[in-house]
Amino acid sequence: MPSNGIPLGTPTKVTQGSRTKGGIGESTLRPDGTLKVTGEFAYSSDMWHEDMLWGQILRSTVAHAEIVSIDTSEALALPGVYAVMTYDDLPTDVKNYGLEIQDTPVLAHGKVRHHGEPVAIVAADHPETARRAAAKIKVEYRELPVITDEASATAPDAILIHEGRDDHHIGHVPHPNIVHRQPIVRGDAAAAAARADVVVRGEYTFGMQDQAFLGPESGLAVPEEDGGVHLYIATQWLHSDLRQIAPVLGLPESKVRMTLAGVGGAFGGREDLSMQIHACLLALRTGKPVKIVYNRFESFFGHVHRHPAKLTYEHGATRDGKLTHVKCRIVLDGGAYASASPAVVGNASSLGVGPYVVDDVDIEAIALYTNNPPCGAMRGFGAVQACFAYEAQMDKVAAELGLDPVEFRRLNAMEQGTLLPTGQPVDSPAPVAEILRRVKAMPLPPERQWESSEGADVRQLPGGLSNTTHGEGVVRGIGYAVGIKNVGFSEGFDDYSTARVRMEVIAGEPVATVHTAMAEVGQGGVTVHAQIARTELGVSQVTIHPANTQVGSAGSTSASRQTYVTGGAVKNSCELVREKVLEIGRRRFGSYHPAWATAELLLEGGKVVTDGGEVLADLVDVLEDESVEVEAEWRHRPTEPFDLRTGQGFGHVQYSFAAHRAVVEVDTELGLVKVIELACAQDVGKALNPLSVIGQIQGGTTQGLGVAVMEEIIVDPSTAKVRNPSFTDYLIPTILDTPTIPVDVLELADEHAPYGLRGIGEAPTLSSTPAVLAAIRNATGLELNRTPVRPEHLTGT
Amino acid sequence: MRVNFTVNGRPQEADDVWEGESLLYVLRERLGLPGSKNACEQGECGSCTVRLDGVPVCSCLVAAGQAEGRDVVTVEGLAEYARQRAEHGGCSTGSCGTPGLPGLEGTPAAGTAGASPSLGGADGRPTGGADSHTGEGTELAPIQQAFIDAGAVQCGFCTPGLLVAADEMLERNPNPTDADIREALSGNLCRCTGYEKIMDAVRLAAARQGEAV
């Protein structure tokens, strides 16, 4: 429904393969589904090798300290222990790793910078032996003051977390304890503020969220006869791991073979290395296969988290409901090591005002180095924290103006052609007003659903089976939010993927094989690749080759990019294969029918057909015993870095928009919240697999719900130690905490993208959280400037 | 110590078990049955759920020695368990899955030995009973098929525990309300799906079960 007469967009027209069963647009089922329901799917922690050892990591018990001494003698003396390694045992001069800045020690050297930093590693014949040996390593620490926030990080006498920084950000940051700073200035916010009839300011706090993927960090390193190593690993990007692992081992990349093991979820938490190098070091040292599996406690220390943030916003608007300006400052706590902090800063700043038309902006985002746990990638990546704050602001401004919050958003909603604060036009459909309209139009869940003929069903009430209320003190609230997320790696990154596609006849049938290095982490990329191959090659049989480093890089399973980028690579390679197959066909059969030379030819249902549907040949006859194989890289259009002073630049590839309506019921006496429904509307461009699309939206929504009402890693501000590294104390939503999630999907083509599709996985994680917060505010009348909301915030106790 | 117990209808003997080992560890690392998962190893996530003498338990919280002489059903044996239950007319006593259930002829334990990483054929993928890439042709329990059909599987790490728990609930309560399903599965964490497709899967399995009767 056009909001202002401009058509929202049009669906992509697919001709090739549109009649092939199991192609794009169908909800085909996962190729790994059967293995996953029978327990036969081999996750990284399931790997087993005859004669294998178990690795264990000793981690620091303090957050910031000099290491005075390490004594491994007792550990080495324990029967069953094969190796104990510290920094001194690292084989080459390369002793650090990192995604962008190589500031993370493989094993601590002289100093530890956060609680749980790896100090030593052990290999033994039983995991318990390895644990006991690690416990026998004596590390003497001389503790240092901890840096835990902006004030302590940038104090004049602050200890530098990393001395002697020489990375490419040090030249433009105001203090060496700031990883990266990105200002974005467009228009004149100060002058625009003078035109504002209302000005609303707010300070917001976003807690530290954990990815909490269920499959623990794990893998198996097997030493090979040529002196190399083969690593079976759960990761988000095999080739990124490879680039970081090989130099530390002193091996050429060709001698570090990597195969993707089953990945039990990722959500950003597997972008950085965890146990990869440690397992390889122990395997090469002992000459035996080494398996490392974190337990949940260690997992909380073994991967980066979502940046906690402090956000300060000023919004102005005219009486008729138009935004005049936005000023904001976003301080992200990157913790002890850089990880993905610079890119998170880029997202938080460039998307910092949300999907709205604002010509005059003044934005600053920074990431700190502190002694808190390192933070990096998590679903939503910088855009999540900003969305929580700007959506709270939008509600506040609407209230000041006496406008309905959805109407106020509609008045300011971005459209195709709107300029971002970076000056970059949004050059694909941006149906912000439409998804808000749709989510608001959905029927509301009935009131007082807990009432039944037999009295209150407490399972439907806040507090649930704790039986804390039968409806007394329970108030309903409704809230809305919308967000904008970039898709793909931004700021000039060479964000390519590679696909190898082969077509041949097997057992009398044409079969396509798709080989990429894409990390299937649960998102369903393998399902979609098979669909693309069916559509592009007109076959029914598609084999997905296991992902490994024997094929070119697929880039990361991050940034909602894999269906776009590796999907695009698979499509491209299939098209190249198709051309070659048609060439063979022309060579063999061209003289029999003029259409070979004149018509547009398609592959459909295992045959070569004209665009009019006339069958020219069976693929089996065209190929005979020939196989056609293509491996090719594919790139989306290039981006460019943001200007370091003004933040201007064509930084992003694509955008993804989702809106939520949350309905909550709050026991105002006890401060308990039950989310009743979390409805979502999202534009997905083209749903290649509608079932998977809905699954992504519901999953992302639920992670946003988690950080709204329960999920937070608590770090003691006096010691920088993590207080709740377990699923007992770090709560993620259960099936009882999670409401129904109705989803309304729009498909408005982005003409720049394969099939018009949009990356979809992250956007719903943005708007879910502020929608829930808005609903709780609506129910309680409280300001609630931090997330997650805990009972004490609602009761004031 | 040595532990003798029955797993998926088949007598098993584990030697040299350290007293501190959990049932989960013995299943996964000694018996070659890694289907039961190790997401938290502290009884919070339910990914290791198995049936011990018919009762769903977190196998990470059961000491291996406690399983001595008892019957364990894991996700690997779920299809056969469901098949036998169907053949024997479901649950007559209300305590289906107790040792009274006729002896299961379990499928052989998945790869426990070999020079290459187990569960990894040449390509690092599982070697199952059927097609090693896809498991195609494998006989499934109704709840397993429903999880696939409803899109309830993403990363799949929570799936084995959820399947065992959901199958047990449907055995007790063939016509569950949504509130019943949520209550029964509240001990099983899933981080990918938002649970909606899991709800769909259990409803689907219950509906198909109803049609079949």
Image (cartoon, rainbow, N blue to C red):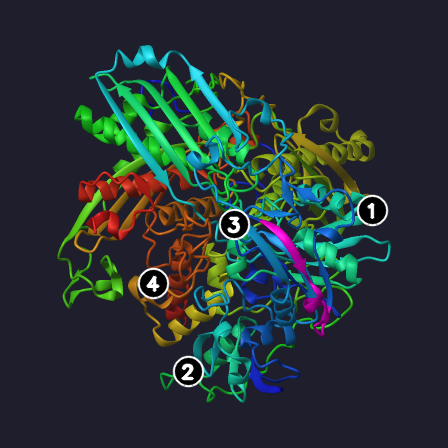
Instruction: Choose mark 4 or mark 1, whichever is in front.
Output: 4
Is label 2 in contact with label 4 (beta carbons under 8 Å)? no
User: Does A60 sit left or right of A619 as displayed?
Assistant: left
Q: Are dots 2 and 1 on a single chain?
A: no
**Residue B182 disc label:** 4
Give how far across and how far down residue A450 sits, in percent. 19, 59
Question: How far is mark 2 from mark 4, CA to CA?
Answer: 21 Å
* Residue type marked 4: Arg
Check disc 1 and report the residue beneath it.
A625
**Residue A63 disc label:** 3
A72 or B52: nearer the eye?
Answer: A72
Q: Could you tell me which quadrant the N terminus of chain B lies in? A: bottom right
Q: Residues within 10 Å of mark 1 (few under 14, many from 20)?
A: few
* Residue extent of the magenta highlight: A66-81
Q: Are dots 1 and 3 on a single chain?
A: yes
Give how far across and how far down residue B85 sits, in percent. 46, 80
Q: Secondary structure at mark 4?
A: helix
The residue located at (42%, 44%) in the rendering is A697
Instruction: Choose mark 3 or mark 2, whichever is in front.
Output: 3
Question: How far is mark 3 from mark 4, CA to CA?
Answer: 40 Å
Instruction: Choose mark 3 or mark 4, whichever is in front.
Output: 3
